[in-house]
Image: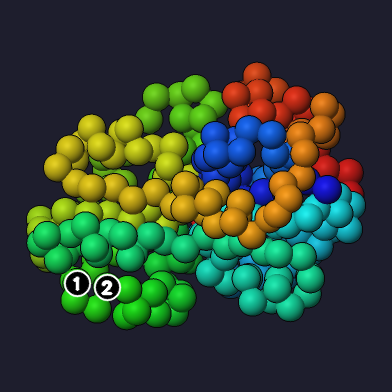
Amino acid sequence: MPILVFDSGIGGLGVVAQLRALAPGVALTYLADNGFFPYGEKPDDILLARILDVVGRAIAHLRPQALVVACNTASTIALPALREAFSLPIIGCVPPIKPAAAASTSKTIGVLATAATVRRPYLSNLIARFAPACTVLSLGTPSLAELAERKFRGASVDVAPAIAPLFTQPGGEAIDAIALGCTHYSFLLPEFAALYPGISWFDPALPVARQTLSRLTPLPPLAETGQTAYFISETLPLPLLAPYGFNRAETCQW
Ligand code: DGL
C-alpha cells in the first residue's frame, strides 16, 4: 500500500522529491490529472466533481494507505469533500502564509498562486489567521504553472512578465517574503530567486512532505516494482521521472 501523491501535472513531483529525501525507502505512486490541466483556470463546481471522480477511481484501483493532495488548487476546493468521501489519511497543501509572515520585516508579503486559489475564501481565511499584522498582496497567474510544465520538459522559460504584476501593484515594492501557493512553482524557484534576489521564498513542498510522514507509522516499504507514475493523458517519458524514483510511467486505464 503506497502513498498516493496527486496533482494536475508535474507540481506534486516537488513534494515527491522531498518525500524521497526524507524517507528514501518509502513506496510512492504518482497521479497527474494532466487531462484536465490547468486546474487553476477551471470553474469550482466542475473541478470539484472531476477531482472526486479521478481520485476516487485511483483509490479504488491502487488502495493507497494515504493520499497527498500535492496541489493547492485542488486542496483549497476539495479537501473537505475528499475527507468525507474516503476514510484514508488525506494530507493537503496550504500556501505557506505563516512562515512568510514571520520572516517579513517590511510586513508586506506576496502570495503567488493560480487564479482559482487566489479567489477562494480558504486563502483569505489563512491570511486572517496567520498574517493579521501583514499587508498581503496576491497574484493569481494563468501562465506560471504552464511555464513550470515546459521547464520540466527541458525548455528555457522567462517568468519575468508573469511575476512582475505582483510587484508593480500599489505597495508591491515593499514585498520581502513570498509564499508559493501552487506546487508547480517550486520548479521555477531558481528563476524567481535570480530575478528578485532580496526576497525570501517559501515553498510548501518540504512542509507537506514532513506532514505526510508524521501521519504514517510505519512507512510503507519500497517495492521493487510499483513505483509508478500514472497520467490521465500524455505520459511523460520515464527519464524525466526516474530522478523522482519512478520506474514505470503509464497512462491510466481506470
Ligand atoms: N499544481 C497546482 C497547484 O498547486 C496548480 C496547477 C494547475 O493550475 O493545474 O495549485
Label drawn at residue 144: none
Quadrant for residue 144, please give it: top left
Q: Which residue is mark 1?
A: 134
Q: Nearer the viewer, residue 141 or 207?
A: 207
Q: Residues within 10 Å of mark 2 (few under 14, many from 20)?
A: many
Q: Is residue 74 above or below residue 134?
A: above
Question: Identity of the amino acid at label 2?
Answer: Ala
Task: Tell whether 154 sits left or right of 88.
Answer: left
Q: Which residue is mark 2?
A: 131
Residue 175 location, x and y as percent?
16, 57
Q: Residue at x 57, y 62 (%)?
A: 92
Q: Are marks 1 and 2 in contact (CB under 8 Å)?
A: yes
Quadrant for residue 223, please give it: top right
Q: Is mark 2 within 8 Å of ligand 1?
A: no
Q: Residue at x 33, y 65 (%)?
A: 98
Q: Nearer the viewer, residue 183 or 159?
A: 183
